[in-house]
Amino acid sequence: MAIDALDTGLALEKDRIDHYHWLVAAVAVPSLLMVILDTTVVDVIIPHMMAALNADFYDIQWVVIAYMVAAAVTMPMFKRLSERLGYKNLCLLGLALFTTMSAFCGQATSMGEMILGRVLQGVGEGLVIPTVTSLIFVAFPPKQRGLAMGLIGLGATMGPALGPTLGGYMTQHFSWRWAFYINLPIGITLWYGAYLILRPGEGKDKRVPPDIMGFILSTAFISSLLIALSKGQEKGWLASDYILILFAIAVVTFPLFLWWELRQEHPFIDLTIFGVRDFSATMLIRLVFGGAIYGSFYLIPIYLEKFRMYPTFLTGLLILPGALMNGFMGVMVGRLTDRFGGRRIMALALIGMAVGFYFLSHADGYTSKATLVMLIAFYIGFVGAVFTPLNYMSLACLTHRHLDTGASMIHVIRFIAGAVGTAFATSHMESRKYLHFLGMTRRLDPSHPLLVPSYGRLKAYLMAHSQPPNWATTQVKAFFHGVITLKSYIFAFQDCMVIFGMACLFSLLLVPLIRERNRTISLTLD
């Protein structure tokens, strides 16, 4: 197998001497963490934005959806833009756009301003994330690329885990606007560091004609799919004409996109990348496993805040040890991947994830805080242990021609997996809650032997405090209705954890599809 020119001779030796790859990591990892962390922080502060922007619960969701869709439709443009601008200029452009729009969002006074700012901020993320992924992978020597992907995982998976902590702290001690303003000093510092450190010309290639139709079809498919998945629960899924139209657009544009791209000499997305078996296998694992992970990232804060009644900041503190464990595991597993390869490590990590979800499926309304911290830390710790070898094996099997496309597809699939996982978690928990509620209410009524003593004592207490008998009866029934509803949601949460654990085991079955690569060989020539 031929060795790519980027990894041979004096260039590689120079990187080892001047530690350029570590300087790249010093800029790339914080940049990745900043843009991904922003997503989960905004999720936390959304309730506090509603009054300031004069928006209701459903309108305010567009603050998240607009950002996600803008980032997802921008990422496939990465290869074409990097060919023209190079990694350095593209990274500077993305950081500048993200930071500037953070300031714009922070001072927004209407939903129109906020959505505009979030769309452009999402474009900034869509430029930064694949750029820093390719930068780190190319900058590190071949024998250290597992570690490089561990550093990428450090930024990509710690963001969702740290979001509740930082978001809760912001809302508790400052205004929600500071969730955007905090990006200013960080973004400016990272932009200046990237300007000084990154080498011009990296990533540039022969310019090819633009594929406008490919871009339009790709944008139509990705945006319609993500919006349908995000708004489906609210609209009633297929009972809504709005959701049906969005799914119809996705169903029509996807095969049209495939047909068009396969006929182009210079396609918008080079679909031949999916002819690489190892890459396609890692993308399938990413879709299944990623859906489980992002679904759990959505449900665990709900369990802690809504079902256990913990404040947002305390919820973040309970998740924080897991975020730290995730960062440690990601870097450590990166070193092990360089030494032993990624397949076996990822298989063991998937088993660990399944065990972690099994333990979480036993969390109820009485689980202590200390136990919750250990359970969450155990499960989140294995997230980095899976994503690190998964990212490495996704890119290590590619030629240099496919690298930039692969770097963008990794994150496009991440967005789709997140949307699918969150949509599944929302709908499945509601359906399971309904079934558990029906099951308990059929078996329990005021005349049930288990309820008679408590029912009578509570009614007597209310009547003793000057409540009329009829009103006391209504309040007691409402109380037990609330208890049964809460219990139903907790059982539904446990059911979702079991499903997520099964998704990890299914992903484990797909691991043998990936061939172990020679870790001394880097990107191959076309």
Image: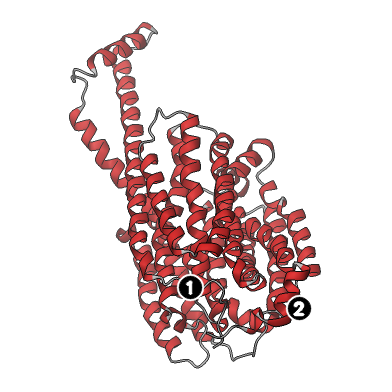
Is residue 396 in view from this perspective? yes
- The residue carrying pointer 1 sits among few (fewer than 14), some (14 to 19) or many (20 or more) residues within 10 Å by Cα, namely some
Residue 266: mark in rendering? none
Residue at x-position 38% and y-position 8%: 466
Residue 111 is at least partly visible in this image: no
Q: Residue furthest top?
A: 464
Residue for badge 2: 200
User: Residue 147: which quarter of the image?
Assistant: bottom right
Image quadrant of residue 465? top left
User: In terms of depth relative to the viewer, which is nearer, 471 or 518?
Assistant: 518
Question: x%, y% of residue 325?
Answer: 56, 45
Mark pair 1, 2: CA separation: 31 Å
The quadrant of the image that shows the C terminus is: bottom right
> Amino acid under label 2?
Pro
Q: Which mark lies nearer to you, 1 or 2? A: 1
Q: Nearer the viewer, residue 278 or 115?
A: 278
Q: Is residue 300 above or below residue 245?
A: above
Q: How many marks?
A: 2
Q: Earlier in the sequence, mark 1 or mark 2?
A: 2
Q: Residue at x 53, y 52 (%)?
A: 60
Secondary structure at numbered mark 2: loop
Foreground residue among 6 and 159? 6
Give me the residue at 63% from left, 54% from top.
Answer: 110
Residue 165 occupies which quadrant of the picture?
top right
> From the viewer's perspective, is residue 511 above or below residue 311?
below
Horizontal side of 406 relative to 502 (left or right) equals: right
Q: Position of residue 142 (x, y in %)?
A: 60, 72
User: Label 1, on which residue?
Assistant: 517
Dot 2 crowding, Cα within 10 Å, few <14, some 14–19, many 20+ = few
